Amino acid sequence: MRITRTRRRAVIGATAVTMSAALAVAIAPAAFADSTPGSVYQVVTGDDGKVTVYISGEVQDGSMQLSVRASTAADAPVLTTIDATGFTGNHTTNAVQLPTGTAYGDYPIDVDWKLADGTQEHTAGAGTLNYRKHASVTDVTTDRSITDFTHRTVTFGGLVNVLDPATGSTGPAAAGTQVGLTWWEDVSPARRVQHTGTATTDDSGGFSFPVTAGGSLESGSVKVIGTADTVGVQNSTALPDVSAQSQSYSVTASVTPGTVHKGQTVTVKGKVMRYDVNNGSYDLPFAGAPVVTTAAEPDTYGYTVPHKLAGATTGTDGSFSYSITANMTTALHTYLAPSPYLSSVSETQNTVNVPVATSITLPAFSIDQFGLVKTTGRLTGANCSNQSLWLQYSPNGRTNWLNMSHITTGWTNGSYCSFVMQGYGWSYGYYRVVHFESPQLLGYAEPAHRLSRTDTQMSFAASSTRPSTASSKVTFSGVVIAQSGSSWIHYNHAHVVLVYRPKGDSNWYWVQKGYTNSAGRFSFTTPAYGDGTWAAYLDADSTHFYSETKTVYVDVVH
């Protein structure tokens, strides 16, 4: 005959793995493939208190026996034995019960069986009996399936049932049994957050757990939290999903004042209205809504509030008002802070203007002989396009500034806008270009520039206005004077041009040129040429204004 061999097989983990019978069967083939024939490779205590033994090799029907010992000591007594009649296949028919008064805990198991050829096998310490109460969550409920902006609290509930292996009975858990809840919350299309919580059973074994939702609640589960004498069943119980309903709204907002200096405040005020499904319009005041104003577009994907400047909660009539300190020109976006309950973003856009400093560079001024003042320069600043500039005159450069002309600047050339301005001025005085404050640029007046020319006057006479023939000589003469202080002096060496316009002709023709003498006198002798008009003008230099004489008509007698 064959001698019985005693073998000890390593047990997975410090204690036996607790799992459902179905799960244990599912993993058995893989484990069997890696085991030595004729050995116990796993002992599992199921959630129903039954024990399943997995053995490699073919087992003789009705030969399996299980012995539970008080400890791992060599002389530890056997607490109970399940003979072959207590097995169905490789698992016990009923939950394993130990003698009354046996403490809950882990107890080693010896397994005896026969191989198909009749060889008796024995494995001491083949596994462990998880001799504890097995608790499961049942009848999970929720008081609502949908949350919305004003109804966000949802309460999960359920019952905890406990299988007591000492009695083999199942009943409600004792008060104070804890269950752990886990669920995912969809806080935006781009992000979901996992939450956990703990509830405690009452005297009936029931529990309730309120959750203030921030979005849809999904993929939740609940499981009993184990203690020294109780374990939660292997599989968690699913929590019902709770969806989030979005609220449509409309927001209007205004910003006053629209232009301020850096560091000053503006007021954002407006109203938020909810959508009324009864009449299909936004006419219901939206109270308690989280209004924000940001310097960036709303985030419709991640539901963040980028570059938030200020915010408030609407009043009972849906109105809101708050201040913002302005430091730069900014587009203001006013809307409700997005969430799964306010996902359809409605916004109002405004702009607060904070003008920045400007100046005029490369200024140049000139005044020509006809009194036309011309100035050129560059208005600085990236926002210098479409700005109003005024050319001004003052007799003393300090007061009584008069507007002479106005232009609007063209497009910016990176950091400046070139300009050209002109207008008829005075013989003496000061000129400057002024930019009055605009939403884009602060006011600026460039330093005054002094311009002057000397005024002149001319007299004119003809020796004859009725010469006898066209070839007859006529002498034209006159005097040029120039202003000097408050008086007039003869203008020596003034360049004078004699001009003639024939009768019936619209054009003037110069005839002679010359210079005045020290007395400021000029004189030109010329043929009469024919009927026509005669005059003279001063060909002014860079310091004198232009002047011209009266006209004299000469009628040739023929």
Image (tube, rainbow, N blue to C red):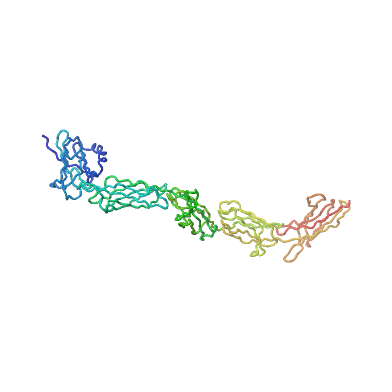
Front residue (pair 482, 375)? 375
**The furthest residue to the bottom:** 486
**Taking 14 as reference, is 484 above or below it?**
below
Q: Residue at x 83, y 52 (%)?
A: 532
Q: Residue at x 74, y 63 (%)?
A: 483
Q: Residue at x 63, y 61 (%)?
A: 448
Picture coordinates of residue 239 (x, y %)? Answer: 33, 47
**Taking 509 as reference, is 260 above or below it?**
below
Query: Which image quadrant for residue 404?
Result: bottom right
**Taking 158 as reference, is 7 above or below it?**
above
Front residue (pair 194, 344)? 344
Picture coordinates of residue 154 (x, y %)? Answer: 37, 51
Is residue 92 left or right of 358 when viewed as pictured?
left
Front residue (pair 79, 543)? 79
- Residue 7 showing in the rendered view: no
Front residue (pair 488, 385)? 385
Picture coordinates of residue 197 (x, y %)? Answer: 32, 52
**Taking 88 as reference, is 217 above or below it?**
below
Is residue 500 left or right of 238 when viewed as pictured?
right
**The furthest residue to the front:** 278
**The furthest residue to the left:** 1
Is residue 392 left or right of 327 when viewed as pictured?
right
Picture coordinates of residue 248 (x, y %)? Answer: 46, 49
